[in-house]
Image (cartoon, grey):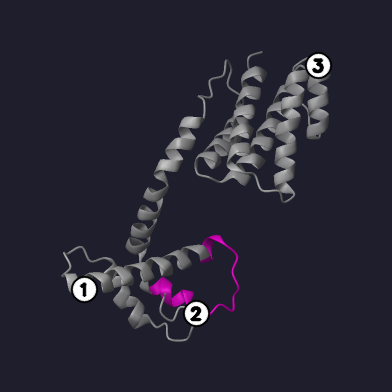
Amino acid sequence: MLRDVEGEGLDARWVAELARDYLRDDPLPPEEKCDTIEFRNQVRALLARVSEERLVPSDVSGEIDIAMLDRTFDDDMLDHYWTHRSLGDVQSIVARLRALRPIALDRLPDSKVQHYMEQASTAYVYGLFDACSILCRATLEFALKEKLACAATLDQLIDQAVEARIIDVGLKRQAERIQRRGNQTVHGNRCDPSDALIQVRESIEFLRHLYAM
C-alpha cells in the first residue's frame, strides 16, 4: 500500500527520501532490496498521480498536495517514469503500427486532410481509439470538402459526391460507416481496438479511391 497517500501524513521529507531511493543505481544489499523496491513502487504511484493531475479532471479537494510533489519531482524523475512507462507500451504500439497499410495515394490531398489522417493513424497506433474514430470522420469530411469545393454537412457532401459520380454506391456505404462510427464515439459510445482499426483502414481506402481521380 502507498503510505499516507490518502491520509494526512504525506510530507515533503518523506517524498524526498523516496525520490532519492528511486534514482539509486548502485547494487543493493539483500536486506535493503525489498524496502527499496517498495519505495520505488510508491514513487511510481506518486509520479503517476502527478501526471494524471495534468491529463484527467480531478477533484480540487483531493488530499494529496500536488504542488508539494511538483516541487519534489523534477524533470529527470518524470523523464525516468515516462520512459519506463512508454517502454512497457512499445510491443503493443509496434503491433498496431504493423496492422496498418501504407497510405500510398496517386495524388496527395491538401495539408488539412493529410494532417487529420496522420493524427487519426497516430491515435490508433498509440491506443487512443476514441480519438482515432473521431479524427477519421474529420478526415472524410475535409477530403470531400476539398474534392467538391463546397461547404456542407457531411451527409450532404456524401450525397453530392454520389450525384457528381465521384464515389459509387459502395464507397458511399463506406463513407457512411466512417461517419456513423465517428458520430457514435462523439455521442459517448467507446470505440474498441478492432473498430478503430477498421475505421482507419476504411478511411485510407476511401482516400485511395478519392485521390486516384
Q: Where is mark 3, residue-wise?
A: 164
Number of numbered markers: 3
Rendered image: mark on residue 202: none
- The answer for how far apart the CA atoms under marks 1 and 3 are is 74 Å
Rendered image: mark on residue 32: 1
Screen quadrant of the C terminus: top right
Query: Is residue 159 rendered to the left or right of residue 127?
Result: right
Q: Residue at x 72, y 47 (%)?
A: 186
Q: Residue at x 45, y 41 (%)?
A: 93
Q: Where is mark 2, residue-wise?
A: 6
Magenta span includes 67: yes
Query: Is residue 204 rendered to the left or right of residue 79?
Result: right
Amino acid residing under circle 2: Glu
Amino acid residing under circle 1: Glu
Residue 194, located in which quarter of the rendered image? top right
Q: Position of residue 195 (x, y in %)?
A: 63, 37
Q: Position of residue 13 (x, y in %)?
A: 33, 82
